[in-house]
Image (cartoon, rainbow, N blue to C red):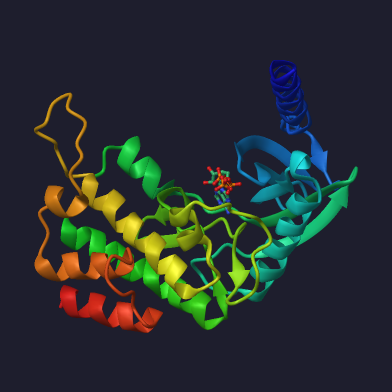
Amino acid sequence: MIEKKGVITGLIAYVKKVYSAWIDYPLQEGKLLHGQYRILRFLGLGSYGLTYLCQDIRTGTELVVKQAKPSKGQLGRDLLRQETEIMRQLQHPSIPSCLSSFQENKHMFMVMHYVKGRTVEDLIFERGAKFSEEEALILIRKLMQVVLYLHKMGFVHRDIRIPNVILQGERIHLIDFGLAARIGDPALQDDGTDEALQRRRATEVTSDLYAIGHFVLFMLYSTFESSEVLVESVKSWEEELELTPATKRMLRKLLQVDASYTSTQAFIDELEAILA
Ligand SMILES: Nc1ncnc2c1ncn2[C@@H]1O[C@H](COP(=O)(O)OP(=O)(O)OP(=O)(O)O)[C@@H](O)[C@H]1O
């Protein structure tokens, strides 16, 4: 009996997976959306949305169009609506502007500026970029100008990660506001009981600072070469990375090993002091 129940549950999960893959299939290149945006290329399937590079046929400009992921139903649409509302309130040269939103064939879309450049993830994993301690901190100082603006506007990003930061020459851009929320508001999505995820997703500024800590570690590990061939390392970043004591102390606070910073500005002040 129990075995039969297990088979049925497995079968339902499989059917759900096939159905999701089918309804989340990206729209075709060349398709015209809203009579204005021609799809040039599918950029990616995120947790809650599908993203396309499009061309505005009236102006020739390249833009990004994000579609709520059909398999996520109402939650996908609510998150895209929230993302649109938040982006409309933000005006910063390092944040893509939201240009419009529309519905078509029961699907919801949002149009924003296209940021041409390379994500920090691409730079590290595809281009083999290496960040010294100082370079990593200088980049974070730039990123914190955008994060401080966001926090001052009353929002948290909640998804600051290396694929969501684009470098365009000397300029830095923060993208993907899909999980952004007003500070203190209850989160729309349920993140279960994973402790690390809950720290990233709390609607408090410390969740972005926690994410910044991991961001710094990704950059610092770009120069790390392990001598322990084929042995899976169980050492912590504090044992593996050779860092100045001040940076170590800063990271311990960001990662909430020690008590976190009391404000975003307090972190920036300490960062400035280290770089000075
Ligand atoms: N405004 C933008 N300019 C340039 N590229 C963008 C822009 N917005 C998103 N992208 C790119 O589109 C792709 C898909 O992005 P999206 O944020 O929808 O999902 P994701 O980051 O892959 O996943 P998730 O949403 O789960 O974090 C990524 O490669 C991202 O770099």
Q: Is residue 101 above or below residue 183?
A: above
Which of 102 and 75 lies nearest the eye of the viewer? 75
Q: Give left or right: position of 241 versus 153.
A: left
- Residue 17 position, x and y percent, is 71, 27
- Tell me if residue 147 can be seen: yes
- Residue 94 position, x and y percent, is 49, 66
> Which residue is located at x 37 percent, y 49 percent?
120
Quadrant containing the N terminus is top right
- Residue 238 position, x and y percent, is 16, 55
Q: Is residue 97 above or below residue 17?
A: below
Q: Give left or right: position of 250 versus 227.
A: right
- Tell me if residue 174 can be seen: no
- Residue 193 position, x and y percent, is 53, 53
Q: Give left or right: position of 264 versus 224.
A: right
- Quarter of the image holding residue 253? bottom left
> Which residue is located at x 45 percent, y 48 percent?
163
Quadrant containing the C terminus is bottom left
- Quarter of the image holding residue 247? bottom left
> Which residue is located at x 69 percent, y 49 percent?
66
Which of 111 and 201 lies nearest the eye of the viewer? 201
